[in-house]
Image (cartoon, rainbow, N blue to C red):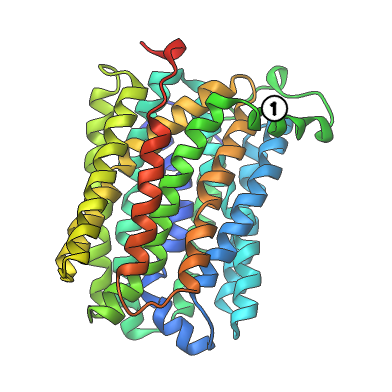
Amino acid sequence: MHTVSNKSWLFISILSALMAFTSLSTDIYLPAMPAMGRDLNGDAELTITGFLIGFSLAQLFWGAVSDKIGRKKPLIIGLVLFIIGSVGCALSSSMIELLAWRVFQAFGACVGPMLSRAIIRDLYGRTEAAKMLSTLAIVMAIAPIAGPLFAGHLLVWYTWHAIFWLLVIIGVFMLLAVLLLPETHPKEKRSRKDMSHTYINYWILLRNKEFMKYTLCVSSFYIAIYAFLTGSPYVYIDVFGVPTEYYGYLFSLNIIGVMLMSAVNRRIVSAMRLDKLLRYATMFAAICVTIVMILMFMGEHSLWLIVIGSFLFFSMNGVIAAVTNALALERAGKMAGSGAALLGAMQYGSGIISSLVLTFLPNNSAYPMMSVITIFVIICAILAFPRDKRYDH
């Protein structure tokens, strides 16, 4: 089977789809969460928690494996596991079953975004990597826009089980597409040491202050992102009475914002130091959510305040994720596979915090969701401010 050029739109489209696997696996069933909780008599927020636990832990395994055997084989194995896990979710009849299969599904889903970043690091330098990540963010945004929109209307005719059958179909198509990708981690660059030594890379990276600064920065931002993902179905549908089939339209506004900022980021990333760009983006997001909280405490509780505030902070993901990923992986050096794994584990695993916190807080107002968002966006901005002069350009 022929492979595709690393400069072709097909190559970019495949990587974008792989990068979208996290959002696809969570965002697509957000409109169904209130109904899913009622149907299975449990906390549907925990399905996000379970997915993120499996997703973050599995990356630590796959990162070490990919440094040893290359990128393509783990992608193929991971997609097979994702398909099996999606079938299990679709057939689940209790919350416990669904949680178990979500963890299994995540073990396969994590290879997409993690190894996409590693492939980009294999092929490009720092600035070009940031440009490519921004390009991928623009294309991959189709999934979180189309997913909730399609799922919301699908729920009018079918139950939430149909959403997971849709993921099975998507997984099969992606498995066929991955067969077209080239191997970007040649044998001469692979680790020849045993797996136990490969895991030492994680310890080395955890002690790398510059790598951890950018990893913790994006992880804090993603706690806020997952607070919105976990809380917004209840806030929009239950608190403000938005019909289930229209939730996707409000959610898609945020993804459009990410696409716009990714396009902007791609144009200015060559003209501005990445660390400076990161500080501007995180500070803007922090100011926006702080203003929303102040207005809420002053008695303003409209739907559009939450929608606009969420749009402004969420849009900055188009800059923050691309820039922090590029800066962190540059600090990882030759341990790009392990670096991408640890970065992904912490970035997406951080959502466990917000999904768990919101599970135990009341969901009859927007206060819990917006409080978690505000606290961690401010932490993200603080982490972005220390300046590493050695890497300024």
Q: Quadrant of residue 385?
A: top left
The spot of residue 170 in percent (x, y) is 47, 59
Q: In this view, does 287 lie above or below 323?
A: below
The spot of residue 259 in percent (x, y) is 26, 43
The spot of residue 145 in percent (x, y) is 30, 58
Instruction: Tell me, yes or no, if residue 350 can be seen here.
Output: yes
* Foreground pick, 24 / 341: 341
Disc 1 residue type?
Answer: Ile
The spot of residue 387 in percent (x, y) is 41, 21
Instruction: Tell me, yes or no, if residue 244 can be seen here.
Output: no
Q: Mark 1 = which residue?
A: 204
Which residue lies at the image location 44% right of the left edge and 79% below the top edge?
160
Q: In this view, does 93 lie above or below 118?
A: below
Label 1 crowd (10 A; few <14 / some 14-19 / many >=20): few
Circle 1: element type: helix
Q: Quadrant of residue 392?
A: top left
Tell how many labels.
1
Which residue lies at the image location 32% right of the left edge and 36% below the top edge?
319
Which residue lies at the image location 41% right of the left edge and 84% below the top edge?
35
* Foreground pick, 119 / 325: 325
The quadrant of the image that shows the N terminus is top right
Considering every residue shown, the one lying at the far front of the view is: 298
* Foreground pick, 391 / 84: 391
Horizontal relation, residue 18 to residue 61: left or right: left
Horizontal relation, residue 355 to residue 145: left or right: right
